[in-house]
Amino acid sequence: QLQLVESGGGLVQAGGSLRLSCAASGRVANIYYMGWYRQAPGLERELVARLSIDGNTDYADAVRGRFAISRNNARNRWYLQMNSLEPEDTAVYYCNAVSSLRDHWGQGTQVTVSS
């Protein structure tokens, strides 16, 4: 199976930056999508950014140009660089991997942006 662990969340002022990391262990060789989702209170979980194994990226309109997803060569760690953070970015951020036709999730990390 696959285990995902996020790190790097925290409290930051508007305009600041944070970098989230996701560490994957287990059957990482079958991962073909790596991504980040977020869920704010009272709202549904939404896609933030996604990266395929062939390098294609997909971003939510709200974060395009401010956030960047990347990964290491071993495909067992990926990152979300978040710049120009806004209070609307406050949410729990979840690491996601698609492997063997299944979604796998981390436990989530809180990102809070103060105004």
Image (tube, helix red, strand yellow):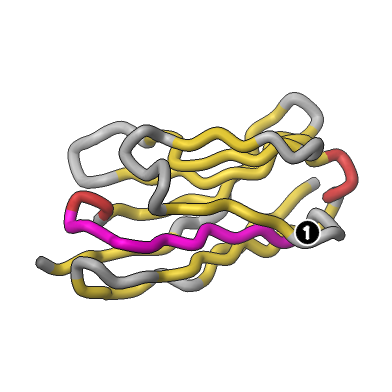
- Relative to residue 6, is residue 65 drawn left or right? left
In the picture as drawn, the residue positioned furthest to the front comes out as: 65
What type is the residue that disc 1 sits on? Asn
Q: Quadrant of residue 39?
A: top left
**Figure label count:** 1
Task: Write the residue at 30% across / 62% down.
Answer: 84
**Residue 41 picture location, percent across and down:** 20, 45
Q: Residue at x 29, y 53 (%)?
A: 91
Report which quarter residue 55 is drawn in: top right
From the top left corner, tell me how far across and down residue 38 is, in percent. Answer: 39, 45
Q: Is 22 a magenta residue? A: no
Per the image, is 78 magenta?
Answer: yes
Q: Nearer the viewer, residue 54 or 46?
A: 54
Task: Answer above or below: position of 97 versus 77.
Answer: above
The residue closer to the viewer here, 31 or 108, is: 31
Name the residue carrying label 1: 76
Q: Which residues are magenta?
A: 77-87
At x 65% / y 55%, what residue is drawn? 70
